[in-house]
Image (cartoon, rainbow, N blue to C red):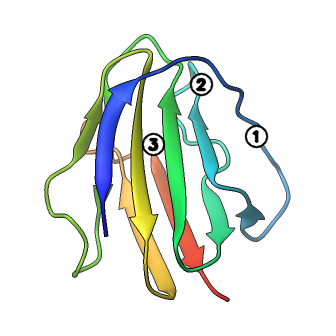
């Protein structure tokens, strides 16, 4: 498993009101203290990118064991990436705003 934090070179995110995880590897952090979409599904080996389009610093902090314990911090305009090598359901939150910002990555073949 690998993760990285870097500058943002652009990109778009999409929100969804549909129930269940959205099949995507891109999660946006719009100016609203949320992850969009919050719940996603990916295949094993996929790299997920979170992009901070908000005016505040946010993070991706995994809540499940076996993943990095240190939050991936993103200042405005930065991205964070993580490669999910194995199947499972992985919960995360923003360590700065855990009451509002929560999400799930479902990794399944």
Query: Does 71 appear above or below 64?
Result: above
- x then y, percent, for residue 17: 83, 50
Among the two numbered marks 3 and 2 on one chain, the one whose residue lies closer to the N terminus: 2
Q: Please report contact status of discs 3 and 1: CB closer than 8 Å, yes or no.
A: no
Q: Nearer the viewer, mark 3 or mark 1?
A: 1
Left or right of residue 69: residue 32: right
The image quarter containing residue 18 is: bottom right
Left or right of residue 86: residue 1: left
Query: Does 86 appear above or below 14?
Result: below
Measure the C-alpha gap from mark 3 to mark 1: 15 Å
| SS class, disc 2 | loop
| SS class, disc 3 | loop
Measure the C-alpha gap from mark 2 to mark 1: 9 Å
For mark 2, does the 10 Å Cα neighbourhood hold few (<14), some (14 to 19), or many (20 or more) residues? some
- x then y, percent, for residue 94: 34, 44
Asked whether residue 60 appears in the rendered view, the answer is no
- x then y, percent, for residue 44: 55, 80
Query: Does 83 appear above or below 43?
Result: above
**Mark 3 lies on residue:** 100
**Mark 2 lies on residue:** 30
Q: Please report contact status of discs 2 and 1: CB closer than 8 Å, yes or no.
A: yes
- x then y, percent, for residue 51: 51, 31
Q: Residue at x 76, y 62 (%)?
A: 22
Among the two numbered marks 2 and 1 on one chain, the one whose residue lies closer to the N terminus: 1
Q: Residue at x 43, y 78 (%)?
A: 85
**Mark 1 lies on residue:** 15
């Amino acid at each position: 498993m690998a993760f990285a934090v870097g500058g943002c070179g652009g990109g778009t995110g999409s929100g969804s009101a549909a129930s269940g995880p959205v099949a995507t590897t891109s999660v946006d952090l719009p100016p609203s203290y949320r992850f969009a979409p919050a719940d996603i599904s990916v295949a094993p080996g996929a790299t997920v990118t979170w992009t901070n389009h908000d005016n505040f610093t946010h993070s991706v902090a995994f809540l499940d064991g076996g993943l990095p314990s240190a939050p991936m911090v993103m200042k405005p305009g930065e991205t964070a990436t993580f490669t999910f090598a194995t199947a499972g359901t992985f919960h995360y939150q923003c360590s700065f705003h855990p009451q509002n910002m929560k999400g799930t990555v479902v990794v399944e073949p």
